[in-house]
Each structure stands twice: as structure tokens, then as C-alpha cells.
């Protein structure tokens, strides 16, 4: 087979160089035809669009063509021509075909038929070859690029926080432990506590639940930073919205107060959604047509709409009024309750019909590091609530007052020995600062229209599931 430089299908689809000899490589999606001509739909992952390969059967050996089945990987040299068929502008008249790898039709699981999402999760190593997951994972890449570009263009520094940590400020029951010790041979002291002296770090260590506290330290030196990395929660939550391993984006900004924090969150999420609309048109159109007919319209409305800012207390009043008017919620509504997704979605989808930023939550349901308001009851927290998702961003102005922070940490059972380094930033040159966290996969659920968080990460980690 003559050596010709490969061209990606995404580039060939835009080409007007008809009559030239090109090379394309990829995986066969379908093959159909008659006794004279076959049509092979070839995809190389660069685009949702397939390249149609037109094969004149008289020019090729029958035995070789038999191996070109769905899933096979081939290389094709041929003439780029204007397509007469619907749905594509170009096609390739095959002159030479080389089979790199065949795929037995009896055992290759991705035959041309509909597959359930549950089945595709069982073959997560092959599901990127489907149209749906090709689109989702190209969009995942694009969202990652958008995030870095947004912060870089605004003078933020990308800061790498540790994945292994010896501090726990979110609740010990939700952390995965990291150890080199044989779990069947753990040494315990006279009180029955595990002795970590012989362990790798000489103390209990865990996978991080958040890079926030370390990012705050960086913000108090570099001004504006963001983290973007994997985080881990050992919650036994088997729901379509929870993963045990997921990615988080956490900006922290010195001198920002709660109003500027809300503005940053709104600008950030609109930027990411606009990036998807501008750079993922074909994939978005496919997902809109196949899964979520209102997807593109919903994305456009988020970019065009000003987010509603609302206090928690005002939100509770609206929910209580809804109940007294006959609306049924599964979970109770009262001042002090941690809102459920159904409450958040009522405010967004039914009452305001736009994204909502909820602020000033009761301090009892929020973390120790959030800045306390003068009323003694609420803190300067903020959650960004989105249609179909509920909470997509959680953040706050951080408590910069040393004495208030120490008191609140004690009240919530966070020992000084675990956060002495964090408290130091309040002892040495403290300053107002704010930040928030965005679960990357929650953002992807919104921009792709997928309904299960396990379908926007390549290899989902959930209770009783750590395959591949």
C-alpha cells in the first residue's frame, strides 16, 4: 500500500481539494451496499461525523473485504470527491485498503443497534467508540481547555494541591485511607487506636476531598489561583449525581468578597457554556437530537440570562409559600434545613426560570471556614443552582478573623493540630478572600444533556465498582 500522510476526518470534512489522493484511518461503524458497490462509514474519533468510503467491489479481493466488519480498523487510500449523498459533503473513492485489525462480528459488542447506558458502562473500555461517548469525551476535553483559558486570561495561576493529605476538614467518614501497611496486620495501641508509626507517612493519610484549604494558602501569596484535579469522597451514594472519584475546579482569590465571588462564578460558568456552543457544534447537535431536545436552547438561555441572586431566607419563604399553595415536596422545608435538589430545582425551573445564586445560609449547615455574618446566624456562603442539575457550584467568602475561625473550628470538632498551618494565614497578614468549587462532572452533565454522572467520566468509580 502506497505511503500517504494521514488526514483526520474532521479536516477532510472541510476540504474542497476534490480529485486529490488522501489517506484516512479509522474504525468501521457500518458497511452496506450491493453486489457492485459497498459503502463503509469510517470514524477516527476526531469528529462525530463519519467519512463515507465508496468501494468498487471489482477492484478488491473478496476475502479481504469480508474482514471489513463493524469495529474493524482500516487504512484507506483514495480519491476525495464531492458526495452526492445526504448528510455529507465529501466522500472517498477507495483505491487501496489495508486492514489493521479485524473485529469478529460474533463477539464484538458494539454492533449497529441501540445499546442501553447500563450495558455500555459494563464495556467502558469500548464505549468511547460510540457516537454518544465520542461526543461526550470530546466535549469533556473542550470544557477542560475552556476552564484553563478562562483563568489564564484573567491572570490566575494554576496551583497543584496534594492528592494525598493528612488533614481532614470535611468529615473523616468520607475519606479513602492511603496506606502501605498490610490491613490484616494493623498494630493498635492500648486504647485500641491504630498505630501508624510503621506506615509510609508515619501518620494516617487519605485521598483529598478538596484542594480548597491549600489553594487559600496560595491565594494569600499569589493573589488569584485555581486548582483543577481529582478529588475523592467515600460516600456510599449510589445516585446518578455522585461519584467516588471526580474532578474539581476551585478558584481562590485574595481581596474578593462575596459579591465579587458571585460575579466570578457567573462569568466563569457562562464562559464555559459559551465555549461549548462555539467549539462543540456538531457534538452538541447530535446530543440535542438524540438525547435532550432542549439542550442547545437551554445552554443559550443560560448565557443570555442574568443569574438571580437570592438569600437562603428568601428562598425558604418562596418554598413555604409554594407548599401552602399546594405544591408537594418529598423533603420538609423550614428555616435551617439543608435544601434538597427538588427544592433547588423548584426555585430555578418553576419559580424564577433562570439560574439562581443562593446566599447567606445558616452557619449550622455549612463548613467552619465560611465568614460569619453580623447576625450571628448565617454565613457568607453561596450556591449556584442550575436547571436539571440543582447545585453546580458551592463557595463562600472565607473567615479571615483568626479568633472567629478558631472558635468555629472548635465548635465543629476540627482539631487545631490538623489546621495549624491554615490558621497561620490568619495570624500573619490576614486578608478578605473568597472562592468556590465546581464539580467538573456536574458541569459536563449540564452541557452534554446526559442524565447520569457515570456517563460523563471515562471510568466511573462508584460503590462496589472500580473496573478497568
Image (spheres, rainbow, N blue to C red):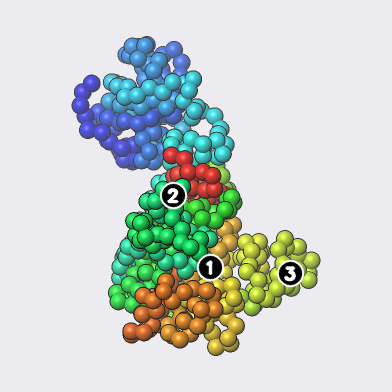
Mark 2 vs 1, N-terminal side:
2
10 Å crowding of disc 2: few (<14), some (14-19), many (20+): few
Q: Is residue 345 above or below residue 124?
A: below
Work out how far the residue at label 1 is from the one at label 3, CA to CA, in angstroms.
21 Å
Check whether the beta carbons of the residues at disc 1 and disc 3 lie within 8 A of each other.
no
Q: Which mark is residue 452?
A: none
Mark 2 vs 3, N-terminal side:
2
- Residue 115 % position (x, y): 55, 34
Secondary element under disc 3, as helix, strand or loop, is helix
Is any part of residue 329 visible from this angle? yes
Secondary element under disc 1, as helix, strand or loop, is strand
Residue at the spot 51% in from the left edge and 52% down from the top edge: 243
Q: Nearer the viewer, residue 267 or 312?
A: 312
Work out how far the residue at label 2 is from the one at label 1, CA to CA, in angstroms.
46 Å
Residue 1 vs residue 173: left or right?
left
Check whether the beta carbons of the residues at disc 2 and disc 1 lie within 8 A of each other.
no
10 Å crowding of disc 1: few (<14), some (14-19), many (20+): many
- Residue 22 % position (x, y): 26, 30
Q: Is residue 394 above or below residue 83?
A: below
- Residue 63 % position (x, y): 37, 11
Secondary element under disc 2, as helix, strand or loop, is helix
Question: Badge 1 is on which residue?
Answer: 384
Check whether the beta carbons of the residues at disc 2 and disc 3 lie within 8 A of each other.
no
Which quadrant of the figure has residue 418? bottom left
In the current view of this chain or complex, which residue is farthest to the left?
3
In the current view of this chain or complex, which residue is farthest to the front?
190
Question: Badge 2 is on which residue?
Answer: 185
Q: Which mark is residue 322?
A: 3
Residue at the spot 55% in from the left edge and 73% down from the top edge: 366
Q: Is residue 203 above or below residue 29?
A: below
**Quadrant of the snapshot with the C terminus:** top left
Is any part of residue 249 visible from this angle? no
Amino acid at each position: 500500500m502506497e505511503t500517504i500522510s494521514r488526514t483526520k476526518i474532521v479536516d477532510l470534512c472541510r476540504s474542497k481539494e476534490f480529485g486529490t489522493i488522501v489517506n484516512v484511518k479509522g474504525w468501521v461503524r457500518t458497511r452496506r451496499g450491493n453486489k457492485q458497490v459497498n459503502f463503509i462509514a469510517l470514524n477516527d474519533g476526531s469528529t462525530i461525523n463519519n467519512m463515507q468510503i465508496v468501494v468498487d467491489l471489482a477492484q478488491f479481493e473478496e476475502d479481504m473485504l469480508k474482514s471489513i466488519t463493524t469495529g474493524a480498523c482500516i487504512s484507506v487510500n483514495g480519491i476525495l470527491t464531492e458526495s452526492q449523498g445526504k448528510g455529507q459533503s465529501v466522500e472517498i473513492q477507495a483505491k487501496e485498503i489495508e486492514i489493521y485489525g479485524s473485529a469478529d462480528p460474533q463477539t464484538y459488542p458494539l454492533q449497529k443497534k441501540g445499546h442501553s447506558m447500563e450495558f455500555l458502562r459494563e464495556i467502558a473500555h469500548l464505549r468511547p467508540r460510540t457516537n454518544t461517548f465520542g461526543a461526550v469525551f470530546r466535549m469533556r476535553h473542550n470544557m477542560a481547555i475552556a476552564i484553563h483559558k478562562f483563568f489564564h486570561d484573567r491572570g490566575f495561576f494554576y496551583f497543584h494541591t496534594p492528592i494525598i493529605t493528612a488533614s481532614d476538614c470535611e468529615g473523616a467518614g468520607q475519606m479513602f485511607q492511603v496506606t502501605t501497611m498490610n490491613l490484616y496486620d494493623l498494630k493498635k495501641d492500648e486504647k485500641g487506636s491504630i498505630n501508624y508509626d510503621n506506615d509510609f507517612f508515619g501518620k494516617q493519610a487519605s485521598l483529598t476531598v478538596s484542594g480548597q484549604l491549600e489553594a487559600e494558602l496560595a491565594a494569600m501569596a499569589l493573589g488569584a489561583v485555581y486548582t483543577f484535579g481529582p478529588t475523592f469522597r467515600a460516600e456510599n451514594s449510589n445516585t446518578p449525581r455522585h461519584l467516588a472519584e471526580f474532578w474539581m475546579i476551585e478558584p481562590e482569590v485574595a481581596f474578593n468578597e462575596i459579591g465579587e465571588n458571585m460575579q466570578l462564578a457567573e462569568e466563569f460558568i457562562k464562559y464555559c457554556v459559551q465555549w461549548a456552543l462555539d467549539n462543540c457544534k456538531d457534538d452538541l447537535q447530535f446530543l440535542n437530537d438524540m438525547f435532550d431536545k432542549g439542550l442547545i436552547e437551554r445552554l443559550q438561555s443560560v448565557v443570555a440570562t442574568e443569574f438571580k441572586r437570592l438569600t437562603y431566607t428568601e428562598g425558604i419563604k418562596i418554598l413555604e409559600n409554594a407548599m401552602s399553595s399546594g405544591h408537594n415536596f418529598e423533603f420538609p422545608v423550614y428555616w435551617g434545613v439543608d435544601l434538597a435538589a427538588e427544592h433547588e430545582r423548584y426555585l430555578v425551573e418553576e419559580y424564577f426560570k433562570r439560574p439562581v445564586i443562593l446566599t447567606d445560609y445558616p452557619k449550622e449547615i455549612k463548613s467552619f471556614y465560611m465568614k460569619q455574618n453580623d447576625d450571628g446566624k448565617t454565613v457568607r456562603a453561596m450556591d449556584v443552582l442550575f436547571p436539571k442539575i440543582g447545585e453546580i457550584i458551592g463557595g463562600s467568602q472565607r473567615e479571615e478573623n483568626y479568633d472567629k475561625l478558631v472558635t468555629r473550628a472548635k465548635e465543629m470538632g476540627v482539631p487545631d493540630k490538623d489546621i495549624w498551618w491554615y490558621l497561620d494565614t490568619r495570624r500573619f497578614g490576614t486578608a478578605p478572600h473568597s472562592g468556590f468549587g465546581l464539580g467538573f462532572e456536574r458541569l459536563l452533565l449540564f452541557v452534554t444533556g446526559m442524565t447520569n454522572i457515570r456517563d460523563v467520566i471515562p471510568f466511573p468509580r462508584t460503590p462496589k465498582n472500580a473496573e478497568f
